[in-house]
Amino acid sequence: MEGGVPQTRYARSGDVNIAYQVVGDGPFDLVYVPGSFSHVEQAWEIPNRAAFYRRLASFTRLILFDKRGTGMSDRTPLANLETRMDDVRAVMDAAGSERAALCGVSEGGPMSMLFAATYPDRVWALVLFASFARGLWAPDYPWGDTEEQWRRDIEDLERSLEDPSYFDRLAELLAPSADPTSKRMFAQSMRQSGTPAARVELMKMVREVDVRDVAPVIKVPTLVMNRSGDAPANVGGSKYLAREIPGARYVELEGVDHAPNSGDAKAVLDTIEEFLTGAWASAPEADEHDTVLATVLFTDIVGSTEKMQTLGDRAWASLLSDHHSAVRRQLSRYRGVEMDTAGDGFFARFDGPARAIRCAREIVGSVHDLGLEVRAGLHTGECQVAEGKVAGIAVSIGARVAAEASAGEVLVSSTVHDLVAGSGLEFADRGTRELKGVPGEWRLYAVA
């Protein structure tokens, strides 16, 4: 640390530079995922946040970072959860961290949950503070705001950003118990950590977040915390997460502050330290996990029998070889892993649903140039992993979704649809269907 501030480094994630810092030399790594906007250097000028970080670094090797589009990271457009996961992996790699605990605060929670479920070999514990599973209200999730409330909130934000005192009022709202200096510096940090347009963009993205299907897949030890006087969306959201994440420990503290470093920060830190040191003592090896959250893709050629009869065996074999080459090029481009090839169909897995959708679209387009029509179906769910292969009900659902698709169509389950908020992908609602051999009704969406 130079002059009390850790040295800021940059991790390369694709074409984007992600600012990060490493503080402390504890026995295990902790990646701190901030809520909304942050600034890794200005954070050390906020007295209560600097003290909070120093305490975390006293028993961990603390890794701090600014999400893309915020703070000292490249001011690119904000990214969806999947791309943020790529950024966290890039930071961990750059910091030499093979496995870490994740601490997701507020809006940082959903991405942390998705990361823990997708990469269980890189996460050994999860801490969620004042977070949530979904932005919008739903019959089974009453803590989200309605569409009308979100619309008003976004309009209010757009107007409020023109007011120079907006960030002072926001600091008072999020950290009412903070000392005057910490509030003033908190407001200044928020003002400089993201543009007005980025703040509006983030609010629109949060509105679309839905990781309810991810919660049951998380298998690492999890601590869920919030303060009893925080907003209902965070209190109710935290209680929901504690119920849905298997074995999660729930701790509700007294207070009204949303910011964990404000109010009785010592109680927050004591709870985190006790939980992480205990979880680390019994953390399994990375290769002991036998399940993972994955997106499965199935494709097959429409009308293949008729095509084969028209062309004849030799010409069909040549065309099928070209089809396979085209599909494999796209799988390689989008980091898909081929699981199986049967006749004219492909089965592949991905570690991100948006990549899988884009891959499916490119496959449809590339084989169309060969005079072929394919249909594709995708689902994201918990898969059993054995010897590099994946199996389980999620795989069956993916195959059934593909069977419902029309020629040239990419069809996805509602789980996939919900996880790609902020990706720029658009969908047409295809209504609910009964999938053969799969209980219940499933809402499906066609990629526009």
Image (cartoon, grey):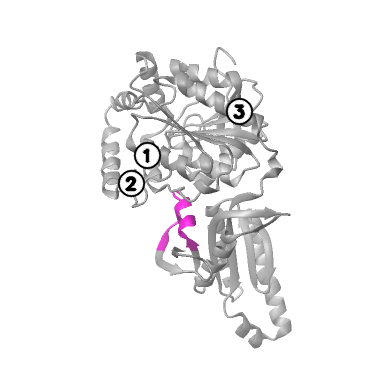
Asked if 14 appears above or below 394 in the picture, the reply is above
Which mark sits nearer the N-terminus, 1 or 3?
1
The amino acid pointed to by label 2 is Pro
CA separation in Å, label 2 and label 1: 8 Å
Asked if the residue at tag 3 contacts the one at tag 1, i.e. Cβ–Cβ closer than 8 Å, the answer is no
Q: Residue at x 34, y 26 (%)?
A: 256
* Magenta span includes 1: no
Percent from the top left, x then y, of residue 202?
40, 40
Kind of element beneath mark 1: helix
Q: In the displayed structure, does residue 95 sit left or right of residue 111? A: right
Kind of element beneath mark 2: loop
The residue indicated by pointer 1 is 236
The residue indicated by pointer 3 is 278
Q: Which mark is residue 142?
A: 2
State which region is magenta.
412-428
Which callout, 1 or 3, points to the residue nearer the camera? Answer: 3
The amino acid pointed to by label 3 is Gly
Kind of element beneath mark 3: helix
Which mark sits nearer the N-terminus, 3 or 2?
2
Q: Is residue 178 visible?
A: yes
The amino acid pointed to by label 1 is Gly
